[in-house]
Amino acid sequence: MRGQSPPEDNMEGQSWRKLERQELDHQYSPSHWSHRMDKDAVIEAHVRETAEGTRTARMVTHPALNIQYGDRESEKMDVYFPNQTCPTSREKGFPLLVYIHGGYWQFLSKEESGFLAPPLVSCGIAVMAMDYDIAPQGDMDLMVSQVRRSIVAVLARFPQITGVFLCGHSAGAHLAAMTLSTDWSHYGVTPDIRGALLVSGVYDLLPITHTYVNDVIKMSREVAVRNSPIQLTALLKNNADSCRCHMVIAVAEHDSPEFHRQSREYFQSVEDLDLAVSYQQVKDTDHFDVIERLSQEGYVLTQLLLEMILKK
């Protein structure tokens, strides 16, 4: 698996606690750091790209849409099946990539989350994307639970799944990391999670509680600590399947220094546990096109995913 060593700290050793509120807000505003377009245009372009990509994916794959995974009306998932796979067949197995969207836990949905499916389904890989209750309707504990339960539900519905891989972007990378740190005894099943690609994620929620982001999410310190993957890495070690799971921590070159710090420190905390993990800084990308480009077969992260999933 290709990987890199994390670069030296470009925050010059500063703790986020030393930053003034205005600077902390700036650091946690990904659109402010794009090298391609201004802060409003880059968000509009991201929504447009991912929504159009999802519509395309629904035309060129065999999707099963709006599958209920829980009791709440919002708890639905879409599964994009490879062309050669019949969703009702229990004979032919296939790996599943679970994609968890970002949007700072308060924006986006599965309607913008199928864009990465075409190059994966063409290689025999199914893709699942779910809705979770974004803030203010949902709180952090609920969102984490919903992602976990959606995985349990998709495995129950499609037992021909041969292995699970996770991919999360931004807030979705946080939720994917929380999924990796799950005590599955509470769910009655232990998913065979074999790999995870976490892209431009947030792994320590405490800084978020001091930014504009928390105006909507309204996390207490206790909730932030309880839902910070960097506080829960020991659960990765305790998970019986963790030794089979290779993690890739990726970050865009033009993410903010705080996003780089978060990715680097989470990577190092996992590496310290002697778990299989690698680090990838993606050149010439910002917080948004670093994930949008997964719709392209030749993109470095698409190739990394294919290598991770299809390896023997």
Image (cartoon, rainbow, N blue to C red):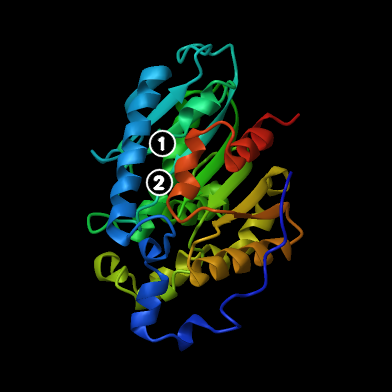
Give the x, y percent position of residue 97. 53, 34
Q: Is residue 147 left or right of 163 when viewed as pictured?
A: left
User: Which of 207 and 143 lies nearest the eye of the viewer?
Assistant: 207
Q: Residue furthest front?
A: 36
CB under 8 Å between callouts 2 and 1?
A: yes
Within-10-Å neighbours for mark 1: few <14, some 14–19, many 20+: many
Q: Residue at x 28, y 49 (%)?
A: 44
Above or below 41: residue 273: below
Above or below 238: residue 93: above
Q: Do we see residue 133 in this rendering? A: no
The residue tagged 2 is 101
Residue 237, located in which quarter of the rendered image? bottom right
Element type at marker 2?
loop
Q: Is residue 17 left or right of 133 when viewed as pictured?
A: right
The CA span between labels 2 and 1 is 8 Å
Q: Quadrant of the N terminus?
A: top right
| Residue type for callout 1 | Ala
Within-10-Å neighbours for mark 2: few <14, some 14–19, many 20+: many
Q: Do we see residue 287 in this rendering? A: yes
Give the x, y percent position of residue 33. 42, 65
The residue tagged 1 is 129
Above or below 304: residue 67: above
